[in-house]
Image (cartoon, rainbow, N blue to C red):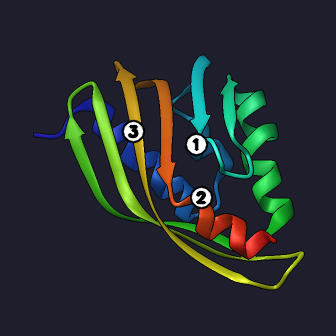
């Protein structure tokens, strides 16, 4: 049986697929720490919905055409939920396409995100942008 945490993150990814920012942000709280990997164009830790939208999602929308995360596997580890998939998109500035494998690690509490950490091949992303 899947957990409340699992269903919250499954709904987050369904919101991403539907380009529904409100659904994506549903498990995010004012204390959620969202970390984009060092070397990624939006590297750093953002805390709370406003900082996450401004520091990550808004910038992705500005820099990329058809940027997507394709979820291939969602692992229910109770308080730890892991999403495995692929980023893809075309950089607006260069016209170069990108595909990079990615893992998202969510630390959860009662259906809300305590933290998010991204692991991806930052070199593939940088090559498309440069």
Distance from the alpha carbon under mark 3 to that under mark 2: 16 Å
User: From what the image shows, is residue 120 above or below residue 113?
Assistant: below
Residue sitting at x 79%, y 61%: 61
Looking at the image, do the residues carrying marks 2 and 1 touch, with CB atoms under 8 Å apart? yes
What residue is rendered at 21% in x and 40% in y? 76
Secondary structure beneath label 2:
helix
Upstream in the sequence, badge 2 or badge 1? Answer: 1
The image quadrant where one finds the C terminus is: bottom right
| Residue 71 position within the rendered picture, expressed as x and y whole percent measured from the top left | 40, 63
**Mark 3: which secondary structure?**
strand
The residue that label 2 is drawn on is 122
Vertical placement of residue 98 versus 58, above or below:
below
Return the residue found at the far right: 93
Q: Relative to residue 60, is residue 35 drawn left or right?
A: left
For this view, does 117 lie left or right of residue 109?
Answer: right
- Identify residue for label 3: 105
User: SS class of the residue under badge 1?
Assistant: loop
Q: CA distance from mark 2 to mark 1?
A: 8 Å
Give coordinates of residue 55: x percent, y percent: 78, 39
Residue placed under numbered mark 1 in the picture: 37
Residue positioned most to the left = 1
Q: Quadrant of the N terminus?
A: top left
Specify which label sits upstream in the sequence, 3 or 2. Answer: 3
Q: Residues within 10 Å of mark 1 (few under 14, many from 20)?
A: some
Instruction: Indicate which disc, 3 or 1, sits on the residue closer to the N terminus.
Output: 1
Q: Nearer the viewer, mark 3 or mark 2?
A: 2
């Amino acid at each position: 049986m899947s957990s409340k945490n699992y269903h919250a993150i499954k709904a987050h990814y369904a919101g991403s697929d539907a380009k529904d920012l409100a659904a994506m942000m549903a498990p995010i709280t004012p204390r959620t720490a969202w970390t984009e990997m060092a070397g990624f164009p939006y590297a750093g830790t953002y805390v709370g919905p406003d900082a996450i939208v401004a520091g990550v999602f808004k910038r992705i929308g500005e820099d990329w055409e058809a940027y997507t995360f394709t979820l291939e596997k969602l692992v229910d580890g109770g308080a730890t939920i892991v999403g495995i998939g692929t980023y893809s998109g075309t950089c607006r500035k260069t016209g170069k396409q990108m595909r990079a494998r990615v893992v998202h690690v969510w630390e959860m509490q009662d259906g809300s995100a305590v933290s998010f950490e991204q692991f991806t091949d930052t070199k593939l992303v940088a090559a498309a942008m440069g």
